[in-house]
Amino acid sequence: MKNHLEKENVEFRYYEIPQGMPVFPLLGEKWITRYGADPMHFHNYLELGYCYSGKGVMHFGDELVSYRAGTVIVIPRNFPHRTEGEDSNLQKWEYLYVDSEKFLKEQFLNRGRMAEKLIAWLHSRMFVITKEMDLKVGKQMLILLDELREKKEFYADAVNGELLSLILMIVRFNPGDREQEPMTYHNRYLADILKTVEYMDANYKEEIRIEDLTQLSHLSETHFRRKFSEYMKITPGEYINLLRVKKACELLRYTDCSIGDVGIQAGFRTDSAFIRNFRKFVGTTPREWRKQSGKEIDNPMNYNISVLKGW
């Protein structure tokens, strides 16, 4: 019988997008690796990935989807996943992390409703798009990656245009074989769980009640807690605190606010709750983290989360 108090480690990989750019790219030969031991993790931005070589399966919650060379993945922010490559099989990927909300609002300044529609669409589903499903998406992804790699004259403007083209291609993607559509549509719970994730993302500074989340998900409290933990690999309460810690990191790095004010602005009700949760997710105190922040801007900061699954 499975132990309901089994511990699972999940990483929150936090990236910072360079000022004036819509994406944070991870490019080059250092991303040739074996993915057999890639831990379950999630990101603070929309993830776009391109597989140059290798094959394996992507884990999305309890769903498994195959990938191979030429595959494009599209994963919403804050959704746990991991890559499992075939044994002894070297893989090469390159990745882009996109602040899709900011980018699309800037691109559709006078068409706010269109921007909101696209943002909601991108944040509510995942895709694993093989070249057999749609060759154009992969080709456009390569054009965008090359622009970021080569950095020719006016490349920032070119990146904006190519990224918008890629997003619109993804939004319009409609595979002929419905069995290969994003697993989002085939799981009756996932879309509702993602609704609660978006609600928490927007309201983490406020007091979020479990009743608000169960109403959004149309599930009982017990059922909601179980399904949320199954998909997110973290409890609802821990997820809210993780969002608050992420905001605290931004404030610590970019403002001169006192430690106490940072905790309040991030949504923590007491100093002790702020310090306790910051240590839990980051592994150090806010004061020490502020001293060290900025030294490795090009690298992701991993928050290691150890959560109890079950009840």
Image (spheres, grey):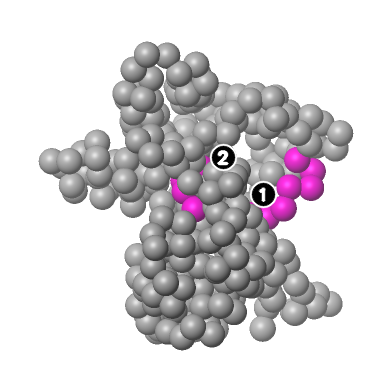
Residue 61, picture quadrant: bottom right
- Residues 275 and 192: in front is 275
The x, y position of residue 146, in whole percent, is 50, 18
- Residues 126 and 11: in front is 11
> Does the magenta segment cover residue 37?
yes
Q: Secondary structure at mark 2?
A: loop
- Residues 114 and 63: in front is 114
Reply above or below: 302 against 176.
below
Q: Residue at x 35, y 21 (%)?
A: 158
- Name the amino acid type tagged 2: Asp
Q: Which residues are magenta?
A: 35-47
Task: Report the mark closest to the observer, 2 or 1.
Answer: 2
- Name the amino acid type tagged 1: Arg
Residue behind mark 1: 82
Q: Residue furthest right?
A: 88
Q: Quadrant where the N terminus lies?
A: bottom right
Q: Quadrant where the C terminus lies?
A: bottom right
The x, y position of residue 23, in whole percent, is 44, 36
Q: Secondary structure at mark 1?
A: strand
Residue 306, picture quadrant: bottom right
The x, y position of residue 65, in whole percent, is 64, 43
Q: Residue at x 53, y 61 (%)?
A: 290
